[in-house]
Amino acid sequence: HQQLALQSAREGIVLLKNQNIVLPLKKNLKSIAAIGPNADDERNQLGDYTSTVVLQEIVTTLDGIRKKLGPGVTVNYVKGCNATGNDLDEISSAVKAARKSEVAIVVIGENEWQKPGKQGTNGEGYDVATLELTGRQLELVQKIHATGTPTIVVLINGRPLAIPWIAEHVPAIVEAWIPGEKGGDAIADILFGDYNPDGKLPV
């Protein structure tokens, strides 16, 4: 079942942009920044209609990167901001992490359920008025990109998103949708060239 979950996640991921062949990343990196509200959020990978109690192990993007590279590589993780709202501001810390890393992977997108004090953005009853990114996520990407560190954006979301600035400025964009329990492994496989992204956009 876990192998099926991994293969399903791999097959669903879409490579939206890869300017100047930024991807795949080399595994001999010495440092990498994993940034963003969905870089280490297990629940946001599972989508709507998931039990509040999840018994299986969930592999986040941060987990997948760490497993792929091993202990010899420094992974600088900073959440940066929440997917919604303005209450968490770690953007300056995220910028510092990006500056001291060889590459920055920014994982953004949606809240898949109603968390305490957080509005869900995807699922039954979670209507939105715009397809733009919520909260301070665009600001986070812009400031990471401004560091000059090669930046890759990974989207974890269950509906179309409008990302015009990112599409124009960020050299590599990966659409992971809601990749499930092995999503982090699948994303890492694609980022580091162990699986060729062959997904197509359904919308």
Image (tube, helix red, strand yellow):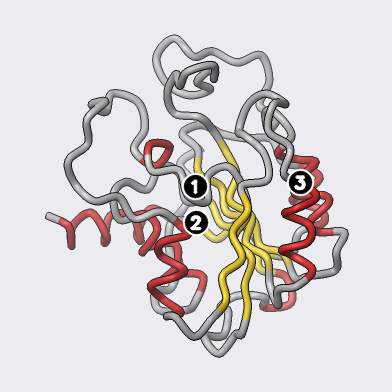
Relative to residue 42, is residue 104 drawn left or right? right
Residue 1, placed above or below residue 121:
below
The residue singled out by tag 2 in the image is: 14
Q: Mark 1 vs mark 3: which is more N-terminal?
A: 3
**In the image shown, does 183 or 172 lie closer to the viewer?**
183
> Which residue is at a point 56% across and 85% down the rendered structure image?
26
Q: Residue at x 52, y 51 (%)?
A: 39
Element under disc 2: strand
What amino acid is labelled 3 in the image? Ile
The answer to whether marks 1 and 2 mark residues whose Cβ atoms lie closer than 8 Å is yes
Residue lying at 56% horizontally and 47% vertically, measured from the top left: 155
- Residue under numbered circle 1: 201
Answer whether labels 1 and 3 touch (C-beta < 8 Å): no
C-alpha gap between disc 1 and disc 2: 7 Å
How far, Cα to Cα, is label 3 from label 2? Answer: 27 Å
**Image quarter in which the N terminus is found:** bottom left
